[in-house]
Amino acid sequence: MPSTMPLRVGDDLLASAKLAADASGRSAAQQIGYWAKLGRELERSGSVSMREIAEVLSGARSYDDLDPKAQASVRAEWDARIEARREALNLAERFTAEGRSWVEAGPDGTTVRHPAAGKETAAKKLVKKAAAKKKASARRR
């Protein structure tokens, strides 16, 4: 998990980040982080053609056609996009909404099974059936 620390930014930068964030599906903080990563890669590269990078990101140009410096900038953008999608991913919510079951590792490393919402597991059905039988038998006595 990335660490965070408070950072003061100018009003103009924050306003620009909010506008860009809305267009790219990021929060303002994520947008500023993205710009920082991109800027880091651009500084490392010396001179990079932003037009070439934009062409690769839009699919109009091959990544392999770029020089190593421009490729580093493209990778930084890909990393930022992957991170944004990963942060937005909530499989538990999705599977619950779809009525699907899922299995995951618990905090202690054990396997935790989450049954589909509204559906009983076979074991629960057997337990209920046995309890109902026992209750009916007790009534007959």
Image: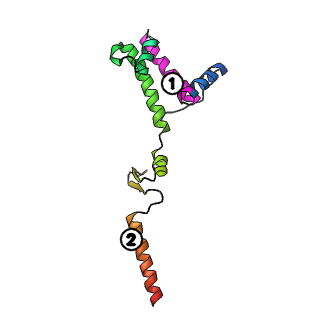
Name the spot of residue 10 as percent of width and height, x first.
65, 20
Q: Quarter of the image containing the C terminus?
A: bottom left
**Count of marks placed on residues:** 2
Identify the amino acid type marked 2: Leu
Among all residues in the image, which is located at the extreme front?
60
Label 1 neighbourhood size at 10 Å, few (<14), some (14-19), many (20+)? Answer: many
Q: Which mark is residue 126?
A: 2
Among all residues in the image, which is located at the extreme right?
11
Q: Which mark is residue 34?
A: 1
Which residues are the magenta region?
23-46
Name the spot of residue 115 as percent of width and height, x first.
43, 57
Would residue 30 be counted in the magenta stretch?
A: yes
Residue sitting at x 61%, y 24%: 19
**What's the magenta bit mostly, secondary-structure-wise?**
helix
Name the spot of residue 15 as percent of width and height, x first.
64, 23
Would residue 77 be counted in the magenta stretch?
A: no
